[in-house]
Image (tube, coloured by chain):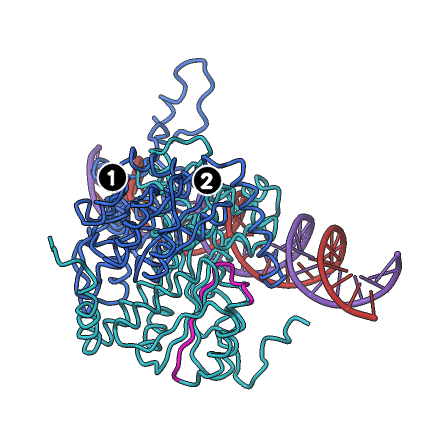
Chain colours: A cyan, B blue, C red, D purple
Amino acid sequence: MKENFARRAGRPRPVAVAPRPAPPEPGALAAKVRTMAPSMTRSMQRVAETVAGDPAGCAALTVTGLAERTGTSEATVVRTARLLGYPGYRDLRLALAGLAAQQASGAAPAVTADISVDDPMSEVVAKLTADERQTLTDTAGALDLAQLEASVGALASARRIDVYGIGASSLVAQDLAQKLLRIGLVAHAHADPHLAVTNAVQLRTGDVAIAITHSGRTVDVIEPLQAAFDHGATTIAVTGRPDGEVTQYADHVLTTSTARESELRPAAMSSRTSQLLVVDCLFIGVAQRTYESAAPALHASYEALAHRHSPRDR
Amino acid sequence: MKENFARRAGRPRPVAVAPRPAPPEPGALAAKVRTMAPSMTRSMQRVAETVAGDPAGCAALTVTGLAERTGTSEATVVRTARLLGYPGYRDLRLALAGLAAQQASGAAPAVTADISVDDPMSEVVAKLTADERQTLTDTAGALDLAQLEASVGALASARRIDVYGIGASSLVAQDLAQKLLRIGLVAHAHADPHLAVTNAVQLRTGDVAIAITHSGRTVDVIEPLQAAFDHGATTIAVTGRPDGEVTQYADHVLTTSTARESELRPAAMSSRTSQLLVVDCLFIGVAQRTYESAAPALHASYEALAHRHSPRDR
DNA sequence: CGGCGGGCGAAATTTTCCTTCATCGCGTTC
DNA sequence: GAACGCGATGAAGGAAAATTTCGCCCGCCG
């Protein structure tokens, strides 16, 4: 009942389902915890939280110690370390020590306070800026360059490109499509699920479909991607959940990071920043690869819009 | 000859005879090595030097590994660690990891260079991230809080809100409208100039119109704003050119910053980041002021969308 | 030349970490 | 509502790393 949708057509599922290539990072650990947390079990979450909350303290603990402190078992601690991308607890501990040192030396992402209802405007601006900056750093740190390269390669030689996104992600989809159009590629963003599927089935080998969804579970976006996948197109998922359902139909997965969200700051807000960075990277990458044709196209589109501006310039 | 200093007074001896009072320091390790070097034996010096020379590399090694690499024995490595003030090799290793992390984070070589055609992907990501972060900081610094407050006030009590944006700015306009809708305000984004003007003339005192244009000269956006302005609506301009034409019809001006742009990185890219931050600030500000109604509205919209996600959650 | 002190490393011991497996709780299905 | 199955969880045994012990060997001094 749960693998029925995995393979509906002949194409074998892409190799990488697991977040395997996660490189053990030094500083971007808090981010990793946040992205992985939803896919963790309760006890693992406790461990992850503890670790992220007090790197210095935890670095001083042995497996047994940390297990006790979190009220779990050693096995769980080790499992958590694995999930975060380390070979074992020993290496997590090393990373923890690194993080602690960074925090102590001021290069500390430490803890950013939530935005509350009665914060003055200046505070709001400061916190928001800090959060977004952090999101950018986290995203960049967690980006899988190999996946990115592969995606860029597919895009650069695509006959046609479809981008699917709904709600907040729809804007990101549009942004990407707009930019790709500007460098002479055939790209379209689809926010309407029906039209998206209709378009998706037109795709074939050599074409590219991109799904953008933070949750990784948005059916309206997964369906068209699956359709594209089944028809042989190269598929890319831009999602905050590298284990989400959407990745089952994705040849390449680009992970966006998740910032803490508060009541006033919905997830859509920080995920958007992250998604846009990823999308920008894709764009620049493609522009590089197709430079010969991209540069003139960029100029052309710029010229074409010039008269839309009032004449008085600088 | 060796226990003469051991018992000097009646107080029970401290557990450790070793040079205990040396506090295991995190960063100032190289210095410690230099200070201690003279009092070390030859093999210990080799170990100390190796460690100081390549903290990152050594942190990855086990006692045995480091012993091999320095051509000594495990015992010597442990002895060296002790001499440097750590309880054992394990802790030296932790400190080493910390040092490595510090070095790595400090070695941020300020990537201010333009993105060029032959930059590798990793470089692209780094530069892009750095640029966006810079843009955020710049924008936050240049934001006029008074104007922001005033804008928020107008929005919070608006009967109806129109947002105008074309091209890349259209996405920002949509983003703002989407979010305001979510907290129960009546907001619409208009990308079609004709419709925008048509809507603008419906506005009257107490309503708010927002124009988003980086250049400040986009006629398709200025016209509807002017129409709204003429009909008595409160008008806000979000623009990168505080002296641009658009500000003539704006009661409040919010300035976005402009990052350097290169051939591969069109202005639209950095201005978008800046605009989004401003828009987010507006949103949070409004959400704060209308908290009583905003919070339930946020939840309601979340609930309404829940079934759009595939059920499997954790 | 012989004794002596200390640096040094091999091996034993202990601690820490990892793996395996049985249990338990939870959701699912009939 | 009951039985089922699956996955999460922890206990215990086994591997690996770290630490201690102990004796060798080299160089210094008498």
Give the structural element (helix, strand or loop) at label 2.
helix
Residue span colored magenta? A206-219
How many numbered dots are placed on residues in this image?
2
In the drawing, does residue A110 fall left or right of residue A283? right
State the residue position of label 2. B287
Residue at 31% x, 57% y is: B169
Most foreground residue, B154 or A206: B154
* Chain assignment, label 1: B
In the drawing, does residue A126 fall left or right of residue B115? right
Most foreground residue, B233 or A245: B233
Q: Residues within 10 Å of mark 1 (few under 14, many from 20)?
A: some
User: What is the quadrant of residue A86 in the picture?
Assistant: bottom left
Q: In 3D space, how far apart are the residues under numbered discs 1 and 2 (Cα atoms)?
A: 22 Å
Residue at 31% x, 44% y is: B236
Most foreground residue, B81 or A291: A291
Q: Residues within 10 Å of mark 2 (few under 14, many from 20)?
A: many
Q: Which quadrant of the rendered structure holds the N terminus of chain A?
A: bottom right
Q: Is residue B260 visible?
A: yes
